[in-house]
Image (cartoon, rainbow, N blue to C red):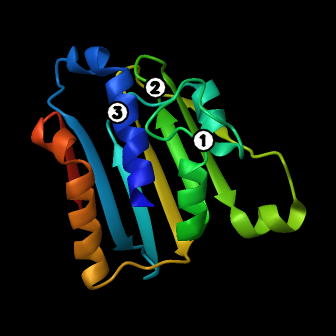
C-alpha cells in the first residue's frame, strides 16, 4: 500500500522532470515516509514529497472515488491513493501545491463519517503560498494497520526492490523516519 503513494510521487516527478531539474535548489526527488506518534501518543503514517505537486483538477481526481487519471500512469486505475489511505486508516488528509501555482489545496477525509452519511461532497481548503513551493503530503491516522517489528524491515526491503532502478539513478531518494 505504501508503494501506491511512492508511485504517485515518482509519476509526478517523471511527468515534470525537466521543470524540477531546472530549479536552482533541486538535487533529487525526496520521498519521506514517516511512521511516528502524535502529541497524544497515537501512531500516524505520513508520506511527503518534493515532487511537482497537483493542480486543482488533479487534486480533485486524487480524492474523489472512481476518478481515473487522464493518461496511463504507474497508478493507472485511479484508486491508488484513496484505497491505500483507507486501507491504512480511518482518517487521512492530502495537502498539495503545484510548482509555480501559488495555491495550496488541502482536504481531510473521515472514512467512517463518509460511510454513515454517504456524502458525495468532500470539502477542501485553498490558501495562497509561495510560487516556489511544490510537493504533496499525505497523512493517515486512526490506523487500521500498524507497522512494527519485521514489517518495517520487510516494507523497506520491498520498496528498495520495487524502486531499485529509480533509486539507482540517484534522481530519487526514499527516506524512512
Asked if residue 60 is positioned above or below residue 6 in the image, the reply reads above
Q: Earlier in the sequence, mark 1 or mark 2?
A: 1
Q: Which residue is mark 1?
A: 78
- What is the quadrant of the C terminus in the image? bottom left
Q: Which residue is mark 3?
A: 51
Position in image of residue 40 (x %, y %): 46, 80
Q: Secondary structure at mark 3?
A: loop
Q: Which residue is mark 2?
A: 98
Q: Secondary structure at mark 1?
A: loop
Residue at 38% x, 40% y: name it: 9
Residues packed near mark 3 inside 10 Å, few (<14), some (14 to 19) or many (20 plus): many
Asked if residue 64 is positioned above or below residue 43 in the image, the reply reads above
Residue at 51% x, 29% y: name it: 72
34 and 38: which is toward the camera: 34
Q: Secondary structure at mark 2?
A: loop
Dot 1 and dot 2 residues touching (CB under 8 Å): no
Dot 3 and dot 2 residues touching (CB under 8 Å): no
47 and 163: which is toward the camera: 163
In the image as oriented, which residue stretches furthest toward the bottom? 149
Image quadrant assignment for residue 115? bottom right
Cα–Cα span, label 3 and label 2: 9 Å
Cα–Cα span, label 1 and label 2: 19 Å
Marker disc for residue 49: none
Of circles 1 and 2, which is in front? 1
Of circles 3 and 2, which is in front? 3
Q: Is residue 35 left or right of residue 88?
A: left
Amino acid at each position: 500500500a505504501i508503494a501506491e503513494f511512492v508511485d504517485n510521487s515518482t509519476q509526478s516527478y517523471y511527468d515534470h522532470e525537466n521543470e524540477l531539474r531546472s530549479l536552482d535548489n533541486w538535487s533529487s526527488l525526496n520521498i519521506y515516509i514517516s511512521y511516528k506518534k502524535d502529541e497524544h501518543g497515537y501512531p500516524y503514517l505520513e508520506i511527503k514529497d518534493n515532487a511537482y505537486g497537483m493542480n486543482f483538477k488533479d487534486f480533485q481526481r486524487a480524492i474523489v472515488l472512481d476518478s481515473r487519471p487522464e493518461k496511463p500512469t504507474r497508478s493507472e486505475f485511479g484508486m491508488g491513493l484513496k484505497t491505500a489511505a483507507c486501507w491504512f486508516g480511518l482518517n487521512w488528509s492530502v495537502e498539495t501545491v503545484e510548482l509555480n501555482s501559488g495555491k495550496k489545496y488541502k482536504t481531510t477525509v473521515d472514512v467512517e463519517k463518509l460511510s454513515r452519511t454517504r456524502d458525495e461532497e468532500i470539502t477542501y481548503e485553498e490558501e495562497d503560498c509561495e510560487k516556489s513551493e511544490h510537493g504533496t503530503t499525505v497523512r493517515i491516522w486512526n490506523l487500521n494497520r500498524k507497522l512494527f517489528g519485521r514489517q518495517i524491515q520487510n516494507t523497506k526491503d520491498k520498496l528498495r526492490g520495487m524502486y531499485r532502478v529509480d533509486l539507482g539513478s540517484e534522481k530519487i531518494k526514499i527516506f524512512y523516519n
